[in-house]
Amino acid sequence: MQSAVQEVDVVLFAIFYHDIVYNPLLSHNEQKSARLFRKRLAPTHFPHIAKVITLIEASKTHNMSTDFDTNLFLDLDLLILGSKRKVYLHYCENIRKEYLMFPDFIYRPRRRKLLLRYLSLESIFKTPYFIERYEAQARKNLRYSIRELS
């Protein structure tokens, strides 16, 4: 897989920084994370700051890109959805804890709507490698969660 990556450092920086600023009550975490990345890397000679920022900001919408590195990064970001059921359920428990400030009558429909959005995509994952290995399990996990949230 690494041989297909155009800029390994770009993908790694995006992984490290995309959630460095995270507040579940805010909707602009990606922009804040991107700004912090820019601030920290601007004094260096790293030539791909703009591309890392593009990847970080892409994690807000998870839309398909024409750029392989972006699609790979987005697939890595959603990989937990395609994990084994036990691991996925542990992730779901942690997500619920993260949003404990919301009562079930608010949390459940919003979480369900988000999961339905992923399930409605032609493909959750964007690269052939991830589609082949994780798509089917991700769909099973999402359907399970949607049923549990109903």
Image (cartoon, rainbow, N blue to C red):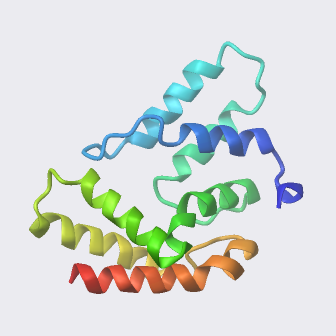
Task: Describe residue 55's horizontal placement relative to residue 59 as left or right.
Answer: right
Quadrant of the snapshot with the N terminus:
bottom right
- Is residue 122 in view from this perspective? no
Position of residue 120 measured from the top left corner of the image (x, y, whole percent): 44, 83
User: In this orientation, which residue lies closer to the viewer: 139 or 126?
Assistant: 139
Position of residue 87 measured from the top left corner of the image (x, y, whole percent): 48, 68
- What number of labels is visible? 0
Task: Describe residue 128's horizontal placement relative to residue 139 as left or right.
Answer: right
Quadrant of the snapshot with the C terminus:
bottom left
For the point 33% across and 58% down, the residue is 95
Position of residue 22 measured from the top left corner of the image (x, y, whole percent): 38, 40
Where is 94 relative to 127, above or below?
A: above
For the point 29% across and 43% down, the residue is 26
Q: Image quadrant of residue 117?
A: bottom left
Give the farthest residue toward the top: 43
Where is 122 relative to 90, above or below?
A: below
Where is 84 relative to 25, above or below?
A: below
For the point 45% across and 74% down, the residue is 86
Give the farthest residue toward the front: 86
Q: Image quadrant of residue 145?
A: bottom left
For the point 66% across and 35% down, the residue is 50
- Is residue 17 in view from this perspective? yes
Q: Image quadrant of residue 82?
A: bottom right
Position of residue 4 measured from the top left corner of the image (x, y, whole percent): 86, 59
Give the farthest residue toward the right: 3
